[in-house]
Image (cartoon, rainbow, N blue to C red):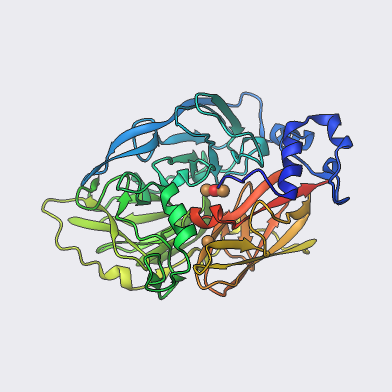
Amino acid sequence: MTPRPVGRRAVLVGSVLAMTGGALAACADERGGPSAARVIGPGSDEVRAAELRRRSPGQRVHTERLTARPATIDLGSRTVQTWSYGESVPGPLLRTRAGDLLRVEVTNQLPAETSVHWHGLALRNDMDGVPGITQKAIRPGAPFTYEFTTSDPGTYFFHPHSGVQLDRGLYGVLVVDDPADPGDYDLEWVVVLDDWVDGTGRTPDEVLADLMSTAGMGPGGMMGGSMRSPVLGGAGDVDYPAYLLNGRTPDAPVTLAGKPGQRARLRIVNAGSDTAFRLALAGHRLTVTHSDGFPVVPTTTDALLIGMGERFDVTVDLADGVFPLMASAEGKTGIALAVVRTGRGTLAGAAIPELSRQLVLGSDLTADPAVRLDPAPVDRRLDAVIAGGMMRYRWTINGAMFPDHEPLDVASGERVRLRLRNRSMMFHPMHLHGHTFGLVDGGARKDTVIVRPMQSLEVDLVADNPGQWALHCHNVYHAEAGMMTVLSYGR
Ligand code: C2O
Ligand code: CU
């Protein structure tokens, strides 16, 4: 997900990055289009002012350290060489309280440039962690300090926005606690799902190169085509050798322990790169309480479909026994697994009928009235037509492959309606940085939403966070093969 440094607007934004204040007025786009002076860049006064409004006197400060480095990681059934934050996959759990300042001192010990993106947070634009759009990449050996107010409570995660590094072990969860949360649960379990290839014979970079070069073999070829889901259509391009839950393969799962009658809150993150997961807990129903950090009208279901980059919080009233918490790789062969234990005994079988019963997607949920967007006239309508296919591995938004893109322009204060139109036969979890949109007509507040094949989905947002914000598919291979653009604030 690193923009390559070519393309008309990429050059423009790059120049915004390189300059400060008054120098901008002198810079104009060579096409005679909008001049750089009209683009609200990450280093602008508007971005600083937006951050100042989030700050408060006596704000608590959390300082954390994150070292991106090569590591040897035990996944359970195998040990792999990969890149991770510190010594573990997932990386460290970071935690703040809403309104706190988070300062993260990153050290890059990788043999490559990197960055850290704070997925889902409406934060200051210059801390969003997207090389070429909001900052320069962090060079090998170099430090970089991220510092921003964490305003909105919820379940978030962080990962590089550099190439396909997310598909290594570089990810971790950030929880922003809500001081006003009644805490109507006894236990909290963080559940991170991932599709795993690194260190098993191919790196994610090699997977991408294969996709780019062997695409065209079509269905029955070695690349995809056969991975289909009744719900999502084309379900992915990569057939992974393993799927992980909290960094473990299913033959060596983590145990989540509780007592019968307790209520557990699960904070579930799909950190996968090319896999949606269908998650269920045998013998239990799930009550979905939050989607992408924001509360929804509680909705009870047997199973939940989670796209890459989506997060859901669910509560479960625990029965007595030993139960599989299973996330099956939608449209693929394989599962991620944890064991939920509230009693004695061993895991009885692996059949989970709940997986094929009632299924909920993020787009089925309704926003909690407290976070529903107020009805308001739409000031600007934007279209993102998303397209592409396996025959030629290129994925586009509005006909263009990033970075050769046409940005989606907005102005501060506008109410924007964005229509996501999927013209392909695959699903795409579309993710917008720096904002939480609302699905039209009171649907959930989200920053990542699955758009199914040939589906058109409308979302509303308030343009209240100035800067340059990536909008892309959270299939990391699609994003790298072009499926990205920028929501660009202008003056
Ligand atoms: Cu999870 Cu643009 O990122
Ligand atoms: Cu996609």
Name which residue lies at 84% across and 44% down.
38
Using the image, determine if residue 142 lies above or below residue 424: above
Q: Quadrant of residue 279?
A: bottom left
Name which residue lies at 62% across and 62% down.
396
Does residue 154 show up?
yes
Q: Nearer the viewer, residue 98 or 398?
A: 398
Q: Nearer the viewer, residue 222 or 377?
A: 222
Image location (x, y in percent) of residue 251: 19, 51
Name which residue lies at 62% across and 60% down.
438
Using the image, determine if residue 165 lies above or below residue 481: above
Image location (x, y in percent) of residue 139: 55, 29
Image location (x, y in percent) of residue 202: 35, 49
Image location (x, y in percent) of residue 95: 46, 35
Instruction: Point out the residue furthest to the left here.
Output: 345
Q: Nearer the viewer, residue 257 or 224?
A: 224
Q: How many marks?
A: 0
Using the image, determine if residue 70 lies above or below residue 354: above
Name which residue lies at 66% across and 43% down.
5
Q: Nearer the viewer, residue 251 or 48?
A: 251
Q: Does residue 227 appear left or right of residue 25 in this picture?
A: left
In the picture, which quadrant includes the C terminus? top right
Does residue 272 show up?
no
